[in-house]
Image (spheres, rainbow, N blue to C red):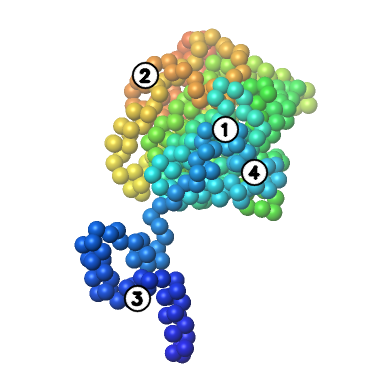
Amino acid sequence: MSDGGATQNTTAEAERGGRFAALRRHPLLTSAATLALLAAGTAVPLALAGDDPPPCQELPATTRALATDPAAATDALDPGDDMARMDAVRELLRIDDPCGDGGKVLGEVVEAATRAPGTAHTLAQARAAFGVAAALDGAGIPAGTAPGVARMLADYVVDEALYLMHSDDTALPAVPAEAAAPDPQGWTRYGRFLAPGEAHTDFEYEQPYGDAEADPEQLVAELARDPEAFAILYDAERAYFAHYLERLTRQGGDPAFRPDPEERGEYASTATTWPDNDLEDIAERVGNLMKHRAAGAREEEIDDLAAFDDAVRRHTRGAYRPAPRQVGTRPPMAAIAARPVAGPVRGDLMDGRQQLFTVLDAWARERGVPRERAAAMRQIVDDAYVRGLWMRF
């Protein structure tokens, strides 16, 4: 390189570094200047650190305001059916290292935009939930934001299960209630016992010719490293398990099922076909949580597993038990996660399989489920839990 090029580089460096560029080129001068500034009681500017980014990012005041304005928050995080606002959603949420309580506030913004305590989700809220999951996909969750994101997923506990089905029938990031309505046989790909009038997020949607994609499995894997977020997700799955069981018939079937006259032979659906699939999904997701917990300890992302488990227990709300008789109500998803507890957790909370068995066995006894059917359901839960615990993605 010529001397002229070196001169240009030096000049550019001086312009970038301003009045401290010379100090960076001469370490002794830097040390002397630092001592002089300290002696004078003056803070050393961050510019002395070179071109490194600032240690944290302040959350904009406009973003903070969204935490207490649910309607505005939903508008801000709703990417639209065509994903036209996806870049804006990413820009709002992708803050690497928020300053102070910025991460917590960002989680509150997510909750304000997507959750519907006690009521059915609107279509805009359901789209916003997709937008959040897509914006955080592969980008990491800002420090302090995990509990808020976990509460969002808990609010969509039925829709999150859809991701395990891997269906190609996904045309929109969210659908209105009428698109999720059961067919004449009582079936809908969006699940059983759906609340009337509730929109649903389709986390399997992928933007055609675009890069908007949500991956709840990867999101849960990261959330599970945070004990409060882990407890929120675990509570939601156990609450959903109790909620689901109490709506089944004494035979463990879907009361809304009607045979399809066009289906015949061994592949024809029965009243237990889709309940079995749904119970598999719930048990597999509980197994997934335990897998992520173990992986976090193995990879040293969870420094002290005993301390982590203690923190999870402190954040866990309690145990969930099905009603002793069949229930016919169809509450919205938010009410499932907010289900009242039946009492404190008994036994080892981190033995997810045993926690599920305890609930299932008690339900089968109280409802008088035939022994063969109860045993089959137990085996379904067992297989799915182990699959979730050991399968890697």
Say what amino acid the circle numbered 2 marks: Pro
Where residue 318 sits in the image (x, y, percent)? 40, 22
Residue on which disc 2 sits: 344
Query: In the figure, 58 relative to 316: above or below?
Result: below
- Select label 4 or label 3 by which is in front: 3
**Disc 2 element:** loop
- Select label 1 or label 4 by which is in front: 1
Residue on which disc 1 sits: 70
Residue on which disc 4 sits: 79
- Select label 2 or label 1 by which is in front: 1
| Badge 3 vs badge 2, beta-carbon distance below 8 Å | no
Answer with left or right where residue 64 lies relative to residue 46.
right
Q: Residue at (40%, 63%) from the top-left corner?
A: 52
Of callouts 3 and 2, the N-terminal one: 3
Of callouts 2 and 1, the N-terminal one: 1
Tell me the tag on residue 22. 3
